[in-house]
Image (spheres, helix red, strand yellow):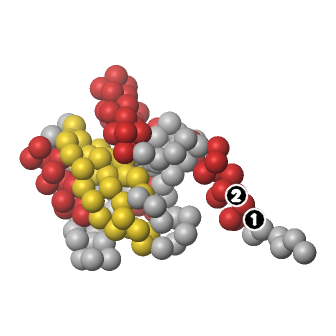
Amino acid sequence: MRLPVPFPLMLACLVAYAQPPATPARAQALVRKAIAYARTHGLEALFRQTNEANGTFNVGSGGEMYLFVYDEKGVCKAIGFNAAVLVGKNRIDLRDSDGKAYLQEMIRVARTQGRGWVDYRYPDPVTGRVVPKTSYVEWYEGLLFGCGVYRR
């Protein structure tokens, strides 16, 4: 007897299959592509391409990998996932399941080193389980640019 596959699971599998695997190298490349885009087209154009569902830096057009941009106080300026809810929100006090203030750490690393990696734990959108995640971050024009990948 064949059991039906729930549609959301089937859709998640198809999307995962259709997209190249999320890797640290791809996360780093996405951040650098976004900064290059901002240099050429300006920050406002970059924000639009990130916040719009069909934008270049939105999860809708790039699988699970998406760009996020925060100011130094932790206000979300652009995010390629759930932008309607998150843009404009101050998220400086975000903590992972271990209590790590990971957004504060991202801002610190990016501001003091120019770029780097931050490890933390975050809910996996496919499984719902909290798993290790790492994000590549860079500082540009007083803003934190980043992209993360899950370590499944």
Callout 2: SS: helix
Position in image of residue 85 (x %, y %) = 46, 62
Report the front residue among 101 and 117: 117
**Crowding at label 2, few (<14), some or many (≥20) Cα neighbours within 10 Å?**
few
Mark 1, residue position: 7
Task: Give the left or right position of residue 66, taking residue 5 as reference.
Answer: left
Q: Is residue 103 above or below residue 40?
A: below
Q: Residue furthest right?
A: 1
Task: Give the left or right position of residue 110, taking residue 39 as reference.
Answer: left
Mark 2, residue position: 11
Q: Amino acid at mark 1?
A: Phe
Report the front residue among 86 and 127: 127
CB-based contact (under 8 Å), mark 1 and mark 2: yes
Callout 1: SS: helix
Q: Amino acid at mark 2?
A: Leu
- What residue lies at 22% left-to-right and 71% top-to-bottom? 100
